């Protein structure tokens, strides 16, 4: 046993010190003393030689033993008290640490009685948050700092904690600062229960540690209270309020935008309908009158002017509708196969003529061999190129406009360069915005300012990016690249102007009667155009003012095709079509819808109603005739005398010198000089009048490629 080691029995006693009392230890010590003394007396009684000294030895032994017992008892008390004291100190230290942590917590911490709600502990966070001193808060109840709750309400709220159905509760409420300022807070409540110390009844050996009064109080009451951690959420609530306000503002803005979009759509639909309706009559009759052979050249020229002007107005309307479709993400690309060299040459011929009218040079260059047949949206590509070239000519007063096409690796780069006024750097992005124009006031009045905006977005839809470089007073360069791989195996057919259709013949020999068509429209001028056109071609026509009247006529005559407007009084075209599809007798009738509202939603609605086809107003004659051929067993009869594939035998030929001079003018693209030249030829030789008339007609229509084909055969090498 080393110096620092305690005896085994002392160690055992020390370990048991938490379980036995001092009284029990002393009783044990005296029992040991008694046993030892009785053993000594027994020893002496068995040895008579020592009996004489027995009394002296016993007294000495008792004295020493008593001293030893006193020393042991004193040390046992110390050994027992030492671990208890150590435990108390450690516990006290931990409690101090815990209290320090609570005191330094930034959030407010309150402890209050479960019955009276009186506060018995507050930390520094509570003092900072509420403005009271510790002594003041310890005299208050929870209800005094939360004036918006009654005792009944707070008890009802805390009930789930008392019955144990929930471990914690969270409440957002208002606390009142000492200076009466209201504070928005979020409070976390927890119920703490230290039950009555019933275990004291079972541990009878330590009852003497408590006096009767203290023991009775603990046994009877125990400890029950609430802990509340209170967080100031004023800033969070302000942020939430701002966020909510921003959300409401955004929702209101979105609703306003939706209302504005609906209003815009309604306006565009109305505008489109109102403008297309009269245009349907104008363009319809120009198409009919252009077929009239009895018109003089002057009358034909007037009809052409009306037709071109109406087409220009229709283009402006379509630009606005295209922009609306682009903004709604509903503009679609419809790719087809077409002859690229002819496509580009026709655009170049048209722009060359416009450039010549302004006395500026037009340069058309193709770098590297082009693919012959390509696959893309021909209409949209033409729209983009014409917009760029028209702007270049419009803003160039002297110099030239260059149109270059560069082909490489399956891509084609289109460049439009001019020597015009140029564009300021700060307007290079603005010019692609809708309705934005540059230039002087006169130039700005020409056009809508939609061309570049639509062109930029069309190029992006086709997979490219419209780029620009410009210098003030030097000019501008627009370019873009798109993929245009050649279509392999496509038939290389150049387009020629088709002959005029003058009638038809049926190839279902079971019937010899003409086909009958029912025209339904509440505006007589729209019906008149179609009836006039169709009667001239040999069709039998019926007409109705509205859907109700059309339904009666359909039941009586069973027409081959019904062409109906959609918006009409009494019964509109949608309901008419639905009624036809419901009828056992009429359900197989072919129905075409025609409408000035060309939005996709309108087209979809008419298909859902049961229409086979949709035709937008103004009605194009060629579109209508193609649809009639698609659904009826017929073949068209053409007026071959009006075709442009006339041979030399149909004209009195000009001389080689006359043809060469005219061809040079055609190559120069000067329409005015071409017309003046053939008029001189016509005056000199009246027999050349048919040839001259043909040249003038092609020149006025800007058909430069056809002019070359017409004149070139008369040039002798």
Image (cartoon, rainbow, N blue to C red):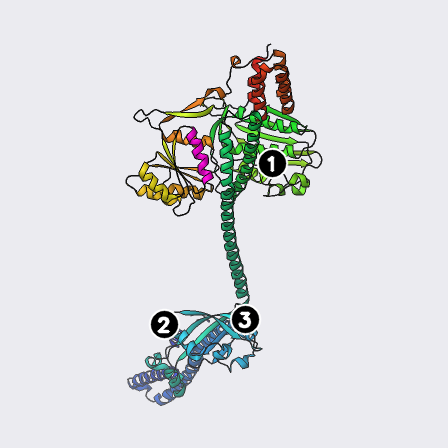
> Looking at the image, is mark 1 or mark 3 nearer the viewer?
1
Image vertical order of residue 128 relative to residue 244, above or below: below
Secondary structure category for the residue under label 2 = loop
Q: Position of residue 150 (x, y in %)?
A: 45, 79
Residue identified by numbered label 2:
164
Q: Position of residue 656 (x, y in %)?
A: 61, 11
> Looking at the image, is mark 2 or mark 3 nearer the viewer?
2
Q: Quadrant of residue 199?
A: bottom left
Compared across the picture, whether 437 is left or right of 102 comes to right
Q: Position of residue 435 (x, y in %)?
A: 60, 43
Residue 44 counted in the magenta span: no
- What span is colored magenta in the figure? 521-536
Image vertical order of residue 294 relative to residue 49, above or below: above
Q: Is any part of residue 489 visible from this angle?
A: no
Quadrant location of the C terminus in the rendered image: top right
Which is nearer the N-term, disc 1 or disc 2? 2
Which is nearer the N-term, disc 1 or disc 3? 3
Residue 527 counted in the magenta span: yes
Secondary structure category for the residue under label 3 = helix
Q: Which mark is residue 104?
A: 3
320 or 407, nearer to the observer: 320
313 or 538, nearer to the observer: 538
Query: Who's the residue at 61% across and 39% down the image?
Result: 447
Cα separation, mark 1 vs mark 3, equals 65 Å
Q: Crowdedness of circle 2 by 10 Å Cα count: few (<14), some, many (20+)?
A: few
Which is nearer the N-term, disc 2 or disc 3? 3
Q: Is any part of residue 349 visible from this angle?
A: yes
Residue identified by numbered label 1:
467
Q: Quadrant of residue 2?
A: bottom left
Q: Crowdedness of circle 1 by 10 Å Cα count: few (<14), some, many (20+)?
A: few
Q: Crowdedness of circle 3 by 10 Å Cα count: few (<14), some, many (20+)?
A: some
Q: Residue furthest top?
A: 717
């Amino acid at each position: 046993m080393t110096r620092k080691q305690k005896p085994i029995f002392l160690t055992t006693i020390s370990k048991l010190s938490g379980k036995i009392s001092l009284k029990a230890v002393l009783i044990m010590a005296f029992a040991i003393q008694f046993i030892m003394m009785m053993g000594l007396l027994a020893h002496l009684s068995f040895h008579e030689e020592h009996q004489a000294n027995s009394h002296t030895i016993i007294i000495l032994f008792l004295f020493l033993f008593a001293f030893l017992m006193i020393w042991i008892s004193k040390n046992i008390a110390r050994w027992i008290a030492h671990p208890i004291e150590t435990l108390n100190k450690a516990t006290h230290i931990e409690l101090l640490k815990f209290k320090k942590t609570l005191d330094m917590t930034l959030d407010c911490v309150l402890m209050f009685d479960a019955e009276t709600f009186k506060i018995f502990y507050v930390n520094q966070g509570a003092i900072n948050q509420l403005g009271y001193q510790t002594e003041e808060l310890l005299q208050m109840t929870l209800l005094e700092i939360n004036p918006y709750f009654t005792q009944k309400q707070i008890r009802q709220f805390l009930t789930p904690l008392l019955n144990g159905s929930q471990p914690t509760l969270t409440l957002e409420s208002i606390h009142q600062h000492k200076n009466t300022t209201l504070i928005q807070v979020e409070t976390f409540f927890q119920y703490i229960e230290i039950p009555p110390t019933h275990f004291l009844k079972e541990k009878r050996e330590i009852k003497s540690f408590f006096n009767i009064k203290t023991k009775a109080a603990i046994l009877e009451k125990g400890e029950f209270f609430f802990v509340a951690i209170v967080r100031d959420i004023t800033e969070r609530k302000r942020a939430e309020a701002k966020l909510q306000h921003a959300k409401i503002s955004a929702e209101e803005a979105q609703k306003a935008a939706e209302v504005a979009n609906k209003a815009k759509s309604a306006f565009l639909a109305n505008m489109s309908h109102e403008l297309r309706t009269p245009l349907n009559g104008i363009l319809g009759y120009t198409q009919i009158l252009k077929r009239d052979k009895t018109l003089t050249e002057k009358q034909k020229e007037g009809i052409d002017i009306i037709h071109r002007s109406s087409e220009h107005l229709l283009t402006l309307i379509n630009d606005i509708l295209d922009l609306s479709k682009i903004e709604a993400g509903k503009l679609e690309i419809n790719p087809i196969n077409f002859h690229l060299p002819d496509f580009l040459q026709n655009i170049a011929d048209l722009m060359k003529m416009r450039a010549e009218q302004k006395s500026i040079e037009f340069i058309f260059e193709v770098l590297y061999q082009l693919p012959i047949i390509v696959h893309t949206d021909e209409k949209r590509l033409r729209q983009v190129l014409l917009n760029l070239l028209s702007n270049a000519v419009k803003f160039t007063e002297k110099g030239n406009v260059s149109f270059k096409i560069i082909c490489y690796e399956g891509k084609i780069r289109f460049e439009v360069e001019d020597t015009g006024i140029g564009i300021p750097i700060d307007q290079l992005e603005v010019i692609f915005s809708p309705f934005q124009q540059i230039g002087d006031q006169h130039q700005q009045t020409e056009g809508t300012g939609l061309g570049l905006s639509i062109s930029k977005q069309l190029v992006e839809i086709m997979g490219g990016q419209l780029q620009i470089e410009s210098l003030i007073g030097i000019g501008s360069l627009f370019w873009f690249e798109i993929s245009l791989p050649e279509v392999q195996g496509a038939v290389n057919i150049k387009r020629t102007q088709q002959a005029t259709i003058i009638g038809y013949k049926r190839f279902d020999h079971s019937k010899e009667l003409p086909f009958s068509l029912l025209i339904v429209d509440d505006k007589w001028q729209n019906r008149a155009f179609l009836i006039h056109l169709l009667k001239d071609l040999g069709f039998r026509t019926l007409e109705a003012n509205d859907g109700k009247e059309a339904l009666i006529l359909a039941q009586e005559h069973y027409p081959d095709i019904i062409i109906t407007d959609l918006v009409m009084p009494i019964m509109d075209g949608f309901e008419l079509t639905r009624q036809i599809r419901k009828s056992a007798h009429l359900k197989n009738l072919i129905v075409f819808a025609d409408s000035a509202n060309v939005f996709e939603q309108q087209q979809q609605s008419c298909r859902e109603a049961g229409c086979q086809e949709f035709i937008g107003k103004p009605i194009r004659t060629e579109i209508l005739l193609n649809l009639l051929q698609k659904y009826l067993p017929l073949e068209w009869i053409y007026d071959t005398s009006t075709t442009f594939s006339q041979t030399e035998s149909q004209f009195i030929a000009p001389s080689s010198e006359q043809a060469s001079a005219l061809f040079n003018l055609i190559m120069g693209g000067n329409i005015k000089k071409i017309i003046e030249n053939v008029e001189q030829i016509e005056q000199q030789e009246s027999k050349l009048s048919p040839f001259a008339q043909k040249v003038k007609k092609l020149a006025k229509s800007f058909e430069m490629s056809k002019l070359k084909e017409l004149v070139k055969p008369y040039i002798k090498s």
